[in-house]
Amino acid sequence: MSDRLLAVLSEDLRPLAAQRLAAAEPVLRRLLAGLYGERADFDAWLGELMESLGVLYAARPAELRALDLERLACPGWFLSQRMLGYCAYVQNFGGDLNGVAERVPYLRELGVSYLHLLPFLRARGGENDGGFAVSSFDEVEPALGSNADLMALTANLRLAGISLCSDFILNHVADDHAWARAAKAGDADARAMFHVFPDRAMPDRYERTLGQVFPQVAPGNFSFIEELDGWAWTTFYPYQWDLNYANPAVFAAMAAALLRLANRGVEVFRLDSTAFLWKREGTNSMNQPEAHQLLQALRAIVDIVAPGVLLKAEAIVPTRELPAYLGSAEAPECHIAYHSSLMAAGWVALAEQGTGVLREVVRNTPALPAAATWLSYVRCHDDIGWNVLRAEASADGSDSAVRLARAARFFSGAEGSYAIGAAFQSTDPNAAHGSNGMAASLTGLQAARTDEEGALALRRMLLLHGLALSFGALPVLYMGDELAMENDYSYQDRPQHAMDSRWLQRPVFDLQRWKHRYDVSTVPGTMHQALAKLVRLRGRHDALAANAPRTLLADAPDGMLALARGERFLTLMNFSGRPQGYALQGVWRDCVAEQEKVGTLVLEPYAMYWLVRE
Ligand code: OTU
């Protein structure tokens, strides 16, 4: 099979390709045979796949090939404490791709080395789930730019030492993608790219055990599509048709689409909704073994054609399901995985003024395999999903549903809470599906009436960011949080967004706040300067690298989280509104305030210390 790949390469490219094939092809073959090997045409299909990979290998630009070699020489490059991510919508951050390029100096100033731009590929007109309904993987959304602009931006970012991360929505395409259009026109091959059922018999059987992502705005997991005269599997919105990965043509086409984007300079792929790739009756059709085999096969392909590229799993799943997305030394999968349990548990700790759930998450987080990392964050464009924490929230015997619903109520602003947010996809006030809102609004900045309330809210903002920065992960800031931007209510006036309150946390970048970023007499300036300082400090301590050891210290009071990073670095975080004491052993230096600390250290409400052993 490898001959088919090598045959399309020029003489000079063959030796290296042959070397990579020798390492990854047996794994790839085994994985694909496991998924598709029973088909009579398997060998022919695999041969064609290898040839198409050869064509993409040959097309990889020289500068990206050079980057591949650089990354291979240092496979853990993204685990460094100097790595910092930033996530934004193109239209909100810069207007279009060229506008984003103009913000590169700002990102550099902040220490950003990884930029995740939310979906920027051609999306369906009208409602499109913020670009998560893709019509073409080979075109940039016209309002945001062109492929030439994309290549110019990736080149510009590379020069600045910033890797571009793009969403790659593997689970579904928009109902106006070429495959969907062909299927509607009656093309049988195109129809076979999707899960289409002639009647409700199978959908009803699957539904018995499936969950629902959008129970209010898009109930059920199947949609009747008139032109198909059948029911299509649509886990998310009815216009997002799930792809059928049991069909090898889907896998081959999607792998090629990813590599074409890699050849335009995308360095990291956020693999959206990875948990949902394989369907199995009698299960919730999430985290199935075949979903992992598909991701491992994709990884093997990337390792052959574009080994400098990183894969990032967006699997919003319980903590125990997460490690599998990073794979193992024998079967590597993604390089990076969102740690949504850690993110949600930080918010629960604030709501409860106690760290029980958070500690349980830390305990359930295993050591990282080589050259892989968690992704830590405070907020993102989606809701804070509480359900991933069910196991941790019941570990002490509590009723997890009641406990998480309380957190959800707290962040919707109920009963004297300082938060101003919204419950997401739960009509029942006692249900815990998710919560929306910008971090500044959820931590109390929006509601603050006095300087003192404002100062407490800022501390909560910094506390959650401090957790993300010191945990041992690749931290990603969410656009606007560095300037303490608040909820944006304008979505309520846009009919295509009004029913989806995740738009509350998708504001346009605030240039006024940005102008005040150095002015510590302002809220944005105070937030920006304090955060920038933490980022700089983090960069100086290799104890804070993603893969450096982490120990949860049991001797901290309940309202506090104490994390040791190696022998010489200690983070103390007070998640409660009461002062909390911690008895230090030995002499430490507070590296934020540059002060020596000994004996019992008292942490004011929501205060945090980063300490280095003297
Ligand atoms: C992802 O999200 C994206 O981040 C969302 O913005 C998209 O709407 C969705 O996919 C469809 O493309 O379940 O693991 O609860 O956390 O939809 C994937 C809302 C997902 C999101 C959820 C999520």
Image (cartoon, rainbow, N blue to C red):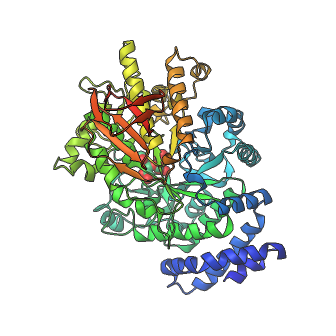
In which quadrant of the rendered image does the C terminus lie? top left
Q: Position of residue 521 (x, y in %)?
A: 52, 14
Q: Position of residue 111 (x, y in %)?
A: 61, 37
Q: Residue at x 74, y 70 (%)?
A: 55
Q: Residue at x 28, y 62 (%)?
A: 208
Q: Residue at x 69, y 51 (%)?
A: 139
In which quadrant of the rendered image does the N terminus lie? bottom right
Q: 296 above or below 504?
A: below
Q: Is residue 184 left or right of residue 415?
A: right
Q: 335 above or below 46?
A: above
Q: Nearer the viewer, residue 336 or 289?
A: 336
Residue 455 appears in the figure: yes
Q: Is residue 384 left or right of residue 241?
A: left
> Which quadrant would residue 455 be assigned to in this image?
top left
Q: Residue at x 43, y 67 (%)?
A: 278
> Going by the picture, which residue comes out furthest to the bottom?
40
Q: Position of residue 349 (x, y in %)?
A: 30, 38
> Going by the picture, which residue comes out furthest to the left?
397
> Which quadrant would residue 462 be assigned to in this image?
top left
Q: Position of residue 316 (x, y in %)?
A: 41, 52
Q: Nearer the viewer, residue 398 or 490?
A: 398
Q: Is residue 303 left or right of residue 560?
A: right
Residue 229 appears in the figure: no
Count of numbered labels shown in the rendering = 0
Q: Nearer the viewer, residue 246 or 511?
A: 511
